[in-house]
């Protein structure tokens, strides 16, 4: 792990690991993380904590040294890294996620080195997971494996008894528009689109921007103030995975300013949340006809699309239903079985001598 900031893909793949453990009794899951991570919540796997800190050097050491050593020490048959990074050398076969966050802002030369080493390590990974509704990735010597897209069982339109309590704890209003984990370079465009919504309904339906790390939230607050929409923009820095489904179900619409990940859009459709997005090859692949699409890079058109979803039920309603139809394939055992089959195919049991003897 040892990643800064919120990532929908990472959280989803961690959830896949948990579901594999519960679905297939023979699956044992050990999470390897740093010693200074918060205590795990109920339902998470066994923990092995190695290393400490979140500096570029600490993350580099964790990813390239501590992680593969720890996997070997616990006798792992497979090392699963839920983002696009892999150690250059590992005795345990590696499967990585296809989500590539790029170097962390402000990390300097060492952060770029850390990221480059992780990318180079992908060439030695047994598989890098991408999903069937994502655009094809350039191979570059990397073994990409396509799996069916999926969502966790919590992501459904039917409210949970805990939904209101979760939203109350998070300080959410009764009605809001949601945007999850926008990248820093899309903040200005997101707020520019929101200015076209704010004047009409901003007082009663604010924009909740969730999953933003501290550096981005600072930029977001500053720019919202400069654009005179600070009164209708709420910030929720890093929600827990267990909070996400109630967060989606409580929203009236999802606003994608061009930076939302494919997994976020799948969650929105699975929770029957109408989406305002921009025309693009990516939107067509993930959303199909289950979104109100505005012209690319036209903030006024995107804001108008979002406002339409809020004030015209005859537009929002059919999009909710189309999203649910599209999301039906995300549930069930098929996607989970495909992931399990991949892991079983790649897993390589460690010899008893490796499990018990020698230093890792």
Image (cartoon, rainbow, N blue to C red):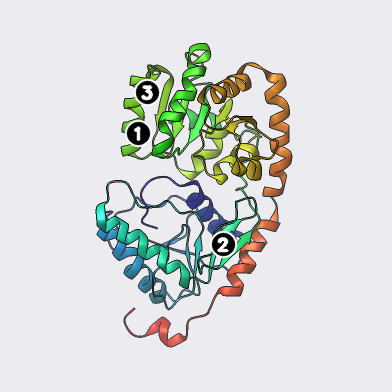
**Separation of residues labelled 3 and 2 (CA atoms):** 43 Å
Choose mark 3 or mark 1, whichever is in front.
3
The relative height of residue 352 versus residue 119 in the rendered view (above or below) is below
Q: Which mark is residue 21?
A: 2
**Residue 31, relative to residue 38: is it above or below?**
below
Q: Is residue 274 visible?
A: no
Where disc 2 sits, the SS reads helix
- Label 1: few (<14), some or many (≥20) within 10 Å? some
In the picture, which quadrant includes the C terminus?
bottom left
Closer to us: 313 or 77:
313
Which residue is nearer to you in this view: 278 or 92? 278
Residue shown at 28% from the left, 63% from the top: 51
From mark 2 to mark 1, how far is it between C-alphas? 35 Å
- In percent of the image, x 42 and y 68: which residue is there? 121
Depth-wise, is mark 2 or mark 1 nearer the camera? Answer: 1
Is residue 111 in view? yes
Residue named by callout 1: 217
At mark 1, the secondary structure is helix
Query: Disc 2 or 1, which lies upstream in sequence?
Result: 2
- Left or right: 225 with respect to 92? left
Residue corresponding to mark 3 = 224
Q: What's the distance in space between the residues labelled 3 and 1, CA to CA? A: 10 Å
Disc with the residue nearer the chain's start (3 vs 1): 1
């Amino acid at each position: 792990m040892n990643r800064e900031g919120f990532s929908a893909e990472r959280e989803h793949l961690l959830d896949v690991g948990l579901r594999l453990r519960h679905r297939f009794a023979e699956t044992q899951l050990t999470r390897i993380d740093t010693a200074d991570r918060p205590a795990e919540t109920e339902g998470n796997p066994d923990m092995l904590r190695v290393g400490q800190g979140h500096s570029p050097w600490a993350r580099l050491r964790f990813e390239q040294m501590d992680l593969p050593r720890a996997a070997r020490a616990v006798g792992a048959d497979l090392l699963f890294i839920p983002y696009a990074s892999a150690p250059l050398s590992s005795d345990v076969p590696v499967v990585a996620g296809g989500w590539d966050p790029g170097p962390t802002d402000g990390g300097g030369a060492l952060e770029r080195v850390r990221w480059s080493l992780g990318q180079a390590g992908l060439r030695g990974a047994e598989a890098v997971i991408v999903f069937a509704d994502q655009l094809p990735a350039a191979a570059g010597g990397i073994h990409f494996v396509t799996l069916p897209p999926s969502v966790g069982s919590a992501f459904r339109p039917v409210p949970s008894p805990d939904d209101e309590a979760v939203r109350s704890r998070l300080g959410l209003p009764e009605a809001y528009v949601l945007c999850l984990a926008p990248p820093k370079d899309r903040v200005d465009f997101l707020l520019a689109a929101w200015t076209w919504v704010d004047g009409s309904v901003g007082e009663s339906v604010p924009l909740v921007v969730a999953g933003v790390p501290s550096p981005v939230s600072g930029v977001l607050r500053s720019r919202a103030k400069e654009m005179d929409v600070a009164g209708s923009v709420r910030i929720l820095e890093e929600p827990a995975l267990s909070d996400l489904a109630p967060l989606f179900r409580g929203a009236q619409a999802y606003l994608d300013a061009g930076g939302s990940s494919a997994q976020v859009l799948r969650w929105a459709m699975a929770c029957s949340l109408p989406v305002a997005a921009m025309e693009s090859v990516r939107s067509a692949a993930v959303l199909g006809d289950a979104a109100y699409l505005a012209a690319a890079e036209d903030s006024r058109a995107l804001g108008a699309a979002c406002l339409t979803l809020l004030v015209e039920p005859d537009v929002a309603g059919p999009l909710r239903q189309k999203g649910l139809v599209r999301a039906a394939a995300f549930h069930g055992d098929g996607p989970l079985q495909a992931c399990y089959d991949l892991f079983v195919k790649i897993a390589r049991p460690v010899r008893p001598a490796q499990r018990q003897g020698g230093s890792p």
